[in-house]
Image (cartoon, rainbow, N blue to C red):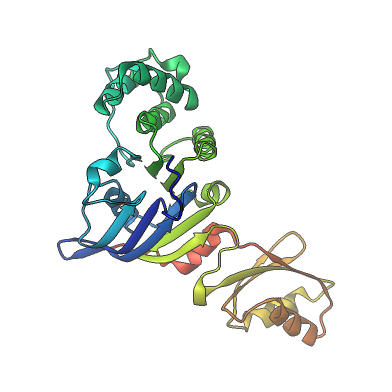
Amino acid sequence: MSSATGIPAVQTRSLSRDFGDMKALYALDLRVERGDLFGFIGSNGAGKTTTLRILSTFLTPSEGQAEVLGMDVVRGAEQVRHRIGYMPDFFGVYKDMEVLEYLDFFGACYRLPTARRERMVGEVLELVGLSAKKGALIGALSRGMQQRLGLARVLIHDPELLLLDEPASGLDPRARIEMMAILQELQKMGKTIIISSHILSELQTLCNRCAIIERGRLIYSGPIRGVRLGPEQIRVYRVRLRDGWDRARELLRQRPEVSAIEPAEGALRVSLTGPEADGSLLSSILVGAGLALQELREEEAGLEEVFLRVTRGETQ
């Protein structure tokens, strides 16, 4: 991994991409730091795959600029390709080839010397848990094993940056857990990883930073914990009363700052929206009405909750 300081793994400036009359990306400014395990979140058609394909040099921008590891993806495309690993959401495999033969083939494509190629094949098979399957035909592997093989393929040349488009798509729960554990291990090894996924609960525990995109526009980019989004800030509070629950619900529903009220094991889970809305508002409403407030505690809004409230599910 390069020791260059101050140069992010990914930097885009006003990045746009048009397909005829349709604008898939609109002035995207994105920054991913080295060592990040970065979640790229958005509905189908939001622009995630377009962004990843530009970063992997498969598409050129219509406007703006994208740099990967300090290199322009257009002028330095060849150098970029040797330092990244791109795993698309759908990738073909040669089902009549053996696992070992498949990886050796791609190692040769990257012009790895024979000795290094043999070493790297063994290392990536061990990393993804497929050492015991090296002599198996790819067509005989399960969907989960084929996904792990796809990950092994993009690791064969020891890239610094991984661009993974829905790597857990179609996997059963156990296979998804295994895939996420592999990604955590890769981050510990110093890899920078950008992963797009619809499984937001897993991204929340997996990633340290994320970006939310909708209709080609960036809505949020930053830490994944404690995310609050500009004028649409969401705060969630746990409220416990001695009594008067129906009265409390009635009072809270009348306030425009209250976006949701849900039962929560002997308490209420109250969501507030807006930069000025916080626990003092709830306290003044409830205590001012003569209700006995026993607990008022802020909770972290889940990534799924934030995503659903700041996006409209619109596609291009």
Q: Which residue lies furthest to the top in this view?
A: 135
Quarter of the image where the C terminus is located: bottom left
Q: Residue furthest bottom?
A: 288
Q: Residue furthest left?
A: 20
Above or below 7: residue 121: above
Residue 254 placed where, x, y %?
Answer: 62, 84
Residue 96 placed where, x, y %?
Answer: 27, 17
Residue 188 placed where, x, y %?
Answer: 55, 38
Q: Quadrant of residue 273?
A: bottom right
**Between 170 and 110, the one nearer to me in the picture:** 110
Is residue 209 visible in the rendered image? The answer is: yes
**Between 312 and 83, the one nearer to me in the picture:** 83
**Between 144 and 39, the one nearer to me in the picture:** 39
Q: In which quarter of the image is residue 111?
A: top left
Q: Which residue is drawn at 28% across and 21% down?
A: 95
Residue 25 placed where, x, y %?
Answer: 28, 62
Is residue 215 visible in the rendered image? The answer is: no
Q: Which residue is drawn at 40% across and 40% down?
A: 160
Quarter of the image where the N terminus is located: top left
Give the mark count.
Answer: 0
Position of residue 224 in the picture relative to residue 86 (left or right): right
Q: In which quarter of the image is residue 192?
A: top left
**Between 13 and 196, the one nearer to me in the picture:** 13
Q: Which residue is drawn at 65% across and 66% down?
A: 262
